Image: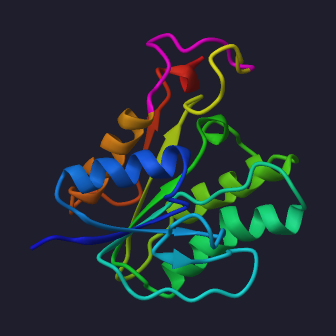
């Protein structure tokens, strides 16, 4: 049986790589986008009202890095939280950011705060929904950009490495509340 998976924000960048990898592994993949011209299976602008059917699994990849704080929180945190609460899939993988893994308190910057809150949601028990996460490092940043934590000791992660970690979590029925950093060891620095 082919599992039906939705990759939110699956028409560009990291989401596109995750969707392509899962398709190549035999998954039936649908993607969502907020842009009507993106060729997505579902139009879902997570900044406002949206409706999605149920799936076997959902990868919460859609994300905003900049813009109004309300929009960033709606897309990066509130929409994934709602997907979990409404049990739109029994298996959810959230895409985080490795920069929030070692933070003891809520960060001030909105993007990092939204991902930090999503981490807290990932680590909660959700009856009937298995929730895990992948925390990529500088996957989509230009190679010339050096993150504050320095270079990655084991090399820059690729979108395909992130996609493989997502697939691992989707296929591991006894793993719940786990976060896999795919950052070349950067979170350890």
Residue 106 visible somewhere in the drawing: no
Task: In this rendered view, identify the residue nearer to me: 118 or 161.
Answer: 161
For image coordinates 22% across by 62% down, the residue present is 27
Task: In this rendered view, identify the residue nearer to me: 178 or 13.
Answer: 13
Q: Is residue 18 left or right of residue 25?
A: right
Q: Is residue 65 left or right of residue 55?
A: right
Residue extending farthest left:
1
Which stretch is magenta?
148-158
Please check the rendered image and state whether residue 28 is part of the magenta-colored stretch, yes or no: no
For image coordinates 73% across by 57% down, the residue present is 114
Q: Is residue 98 left or right of residue 134?
A: right
Residue extending farthest front:
37
Percent x, y for residue 40?
50, 69
For image coordinates 51% across by 45% down, the residue present is 14
Residue 166 visible somewhere in the drawing: yes
Percent x, y for residue 174?
22, 61
For image coordinates 62% across by 60% down, the residue present is 118
Quarter the N terminus occupies: bottom left
Percent x, y for residue 28?
25, 68
């Amino acid at each position: 049986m082919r599992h039906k998976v939705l990759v939110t924000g699956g028409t560009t960048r990291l989401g596109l790589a995750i969707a392509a990898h899962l398709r190549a592994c035999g998954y039936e993949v649908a993607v969502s986008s907020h842009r009507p011209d993106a060729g997505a299976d579902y139009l879902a602008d997570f900044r406002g009202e949206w409706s999605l059917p149920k799936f076997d699994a959902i990868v919460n990849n859609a994300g905003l890095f900049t813009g109004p704080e309300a929009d960033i929180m709606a897309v990066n945190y509130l929409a994934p939280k709602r997907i979990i609460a409404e049990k739109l899939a029994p298996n959810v993988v959230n895409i985080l950011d490795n920069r929030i893994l070692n933070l003891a308190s809520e960060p001030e910057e909105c993007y990092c705060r939204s991902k930090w809150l999503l981490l807290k949601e990932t680590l909660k028990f959700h009856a009937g929904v298995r929730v895990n996460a992948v925390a990529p490092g500088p996957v989509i940043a230009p190679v010339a950009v050096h993150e504050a934590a320095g270079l990655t000791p084991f090399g820059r992660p690729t979108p395909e490495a992130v996609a493989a970690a997502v697939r691992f979590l989707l296929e591991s029925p006894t793993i719940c509340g786990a976060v896999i950093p795919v950052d070349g060891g950067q979170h350890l620095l």
